[in-house]
Image: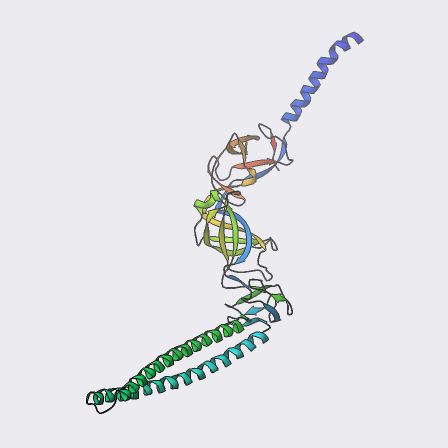
Amino acid sequence: MITWFRYLRLPLLVAAIAGAVFYVRTRPVPVEVHEVETGPLVAEVMGTGTLEARVRATISPKISGRIAEVLVDQGDSIKAGELLARLDDDEWAKQVKVAEATIEAARASLGRFKAEQQQAQSTRVLAESEFNRMSELVGQNAVTQSEFDKAREALEVAKAGVTRADAALLEAEQQVVLAKESLAYQETRFADTRLLAPFDGLVIKRYRDAGAIAVPGSPIIDIISLDELWISAWVDETEMDRLKSDLPARVVFRSEPEKDYQGQVARLGKQSDRETREFVVDVRVVELPENWAIGQRAEVYIEWARTDEVTIVPERLVSRRNGQAGVYVVRKSRAEWQPIEIGLQGREEVEVTKGLAPGDKMVTPVRDNMSLEGRNVQLP
């Protein structure tokens, strides 16, 4: 008896295993059911970027000096022409006064040289008249040659005096011009101690305070215009052909991931990054969060296509076999893989152009990594 059992033990074990496998394979698998529906579908292109201002400026001095005061702080609104900061202007004010005194002195000298030039002209006229008279008289032997020579010498002296007076007047005029240029330069430098807002906007950063030394080009404050703020988003270059200006978009800030803000494509970049193969798309933000900051991160979803009534399925239900998309459907209480053709792809749903019809039931296993192919399914 024991011998026979020994011979039957292996076949019995194999049969038991086979029975267990058969039971597992034929036992209905619990699944979730998703019915194929129709509805609208929005196709979007996604990009990630930061909030930026189209117009931005760094306020820095044109001259070196000690900062006397900074009149604004980050978060302050400003108006074009408003005084934002001021350098110590004492030395430049002195230079302006010196230049003003110099120009007054140059003008006074110019007046004197004009008078001297006029006097020299009058002297020459008299000398020419006397020389002409002596020329007639010497021809009539009415005057001596010596008297005639004196008249001629006086004329030469008068002409030389006019030449000197003209040269002195020209020099005086040049001194006035130079004095005016010096005054203009000193006034410009004095004006450069006052840093004014170039446009209406907002102060977003303050770098220095009163007492600090500033040199040309060193930043004191950063300002932006609020006329146009946008998300400068990086988008994969493969999406380039789908995008154009004025397309609607959704903006999702990292600070408020649950809320969408309305946006619109303002412009498309014309240079792709050679490393990431992405290009910049600027999406204008119609409305901003209550609290925002330049440089904060956000995602943009640009709507490039929309359909009204199409067959749609959740994207998470779609799997692929050798590049072919498909879903599991229920036929005669069994799960079968159904190939499908996909049209537009939305954020969470895809359009099915072939392979499914409204009302078809798709299934997914309740537990992950459970195979459904050919299995009986247990519908909820």
Residue 89 versus residue 13 in the image, above or below: below
Q: Residue furthest right?
A: 2
- Left-right relation of 185 to 9: left
Name which quarter of the figure residue 173 lies in: bottom left
Closest to the observer: 85 or 276? 85
Closest to the observer: 213 or 330? 213
Query: Could you tell me residue 235's position as x and y percent?
Result: 51, 47
Q: Residue at x 66, y 23 (%)?
A: 21
- Left-right relation of 315 to 160: right
Quadrant of the drawing holding the C terminus = top right
Query: Could you tell me residue 206's position as x and y percent?
Result: 61, 64
- Left-right relation of 16 to 63: right
Closest to the observer: 365 or 210? 210
Q: Residue at x 54, y 76 (%)?
A: 95
Query: Could you tell me residue 19's position as x and y percent?
Result: 68, 20
- Left-right relation of 241 to 348: left
Q: Residue at x 34, y 82 (%)?
A: 162
Residue 1 seen from this side: no
Closest to the observer: 102 or 203? 102
Residue 208 versus residue 89 in the image, above or below: above
Q: Residue at x 51, y 74 (%)?
A: 186
Q: Residue furthest bottom?
A: 142
Residue 12 seen from this side: yes
Query: Could you tell me residue 90's position as x and y percent?
Result: 59, 76
